[in-house]
Structure formats: structure tokens, C-alpha cells
Image (spheres, rainbow, N blue to C red):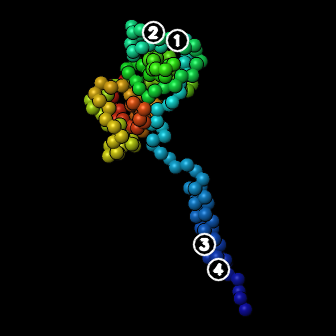
Amino acid sequence: MFHFHPDTALSLVVPAFRRGLVFVFIVLALLLPPFSSKVAAKAPPLATTVLDTTMYATPDLSGDTVGSVPVGSEVELTGDAAPGFLAVYYGDGVAWVPSQYLTTGVRPGIDTAVAIGDTPLLEAPMRDAGVILTVPEGAAVILTGATVDGYDAASHEGAGGWINGRDIAR
């Protein structure tokens, strides 16, 4: 005759419970998107003007004006930057807009920085990550807002990546 013993019951339940947990983790891993450091680093494709904004032919307030954009207008960023300016598509060409007059969220302004020396734009926020491209000394980058362990998410010439915060001047 079989006698029920609590330890026997527990030994039957625990493996089933473990199988259930493994199943739940597998389902979650398949359904949830993987974390990628590249996501936060990608340059935003669109920005919104926070004021009536003059557009310039060159990244210089004393340069020729090519038009204006009313407050609340959405503009498409090219991915190019100069200190304090972002390039946007305008008509059949490109125009430059002061970065403080644009926003990608609730805070006005889009930050830019300048490379202090030839600086690698990395695939991940770590020293030994792969190099996407080298930002030349004096070139501007768009800072996309994220920071991890001293690295800033940045974009240069449309490529998104991570740049060491010590290698840029804001």
C-alpha cells in the first residue's frame, strides 16, 4: 500500500514549479525587445520649433537667411550639427537652425558638443566597444540625452553611437 509522505509531495511539486518558471522566462525573452545601447544613441529624425525660428544658409547667425519656421513646426533633422546649430531639410536643400530653438521632447533645446580631438563614436558606452566612425577634432555632435558611465549618446553625420564625455566640450 502507498503511504503519502509530505517530502514526496514536495519533491513532485518543485520540479513542476521550476519548469513553469523556465517557461515564463522563455516566453518573456521572446516577447520583450532586447535592450540595446544603440537605441538611445540614435539621433532623432524630427524636432519641433519652440519659437518662430529663422533658418540660415550656414551655421552662423550673421549668415544669409533662407526662410523662417513658425513656432510648433516639425522639421526633419539631417543628422549634421555645428556648434549651437542643427541642419534641417528645407525645400530642396538644407538650412541651419539654432539648436536652442528646437526640441525633441518637453525641454526646449537640443544639446550639441564639439570633439576636443579625433574621437571615436562607439557602438556601446564602454572603452573596448567597436568604433562606428571617428569624429574629427572640432566637429560637432548632437547629444541625444542619454548618459551611461561617463559616455554620452551622440550622433555625428547621421550615425548614432556613444562618445566619451571627456572627449567633448559642451
Mark 1 and mark 3: Cα distance apart in space: 68 Å
The residues bearing labels 4 and 2 have C-alpha atoms spaced at a distance of 83 Å
Q: Earlier in the sequence, mark 4 or mark 3?
A: 4
User: Marks 2/1: CA distance?
Assistant: 8 Å
Q: Identify the amino acid type marked 2.
A: Thr
Q: Residues within 10 Å of mark 4 (few under 14, many from 20)?
A: few
Q: Quadrant of the N terminus?
A: bottom right
The mark lying in front, picked from 4 and 2, is 2
Disc on the earlier residue, 1 or 4: 4
Q: Earlier in the sequence, mark 3 or mark 2?
A: 3
**Left or right of 66 on screen, residue 169:** left
What is the quadrant of residue 135 in the picture? top left
Read off the residue under disc 2: 65
Q: Is residue 166 above or below residue 96?
A: below
Query: Up-down: is 50 above or below 18?
Result: above
| Residue highlighted by disc 3 | 15
| Residue corresponding to mark 1 | 68
Few, some or many residues within 10 Å of mark 2 (<14, 14–19, 20+): some
Amino acid residing under circle 1: Ser
Q: Is residue 109 visible?
A: no
Q: Residue 138: give x, y in percent of width and height.
A: 30, 24
Crowding at mark 3 (Cα within 10 Å: few <14, some 14-19, many 20+): few
Q: Are marks 4 and 2 in contact (CB under 8 Å)?
A: no
- The residue that label 4 is drawn on is 8
For discs 4 and 3, the disc positioned in front in the rendered view: 3
Q: Are marks 1 and 3 in contact (CB under 8 Å)?
A: no
- First in residue order: circle 4 vs circle 2: 4
Confirm or deny contact between disc 2 and disc 1 (CB under 8 A).
yes
Distance between mark 1 and mark 4 Cα atoms: 79 Å
Q: Amino acid type of disc 4? A: Thr
- Is residue 62 among what the camera can see? yes
Res 125 → quadrant: top left
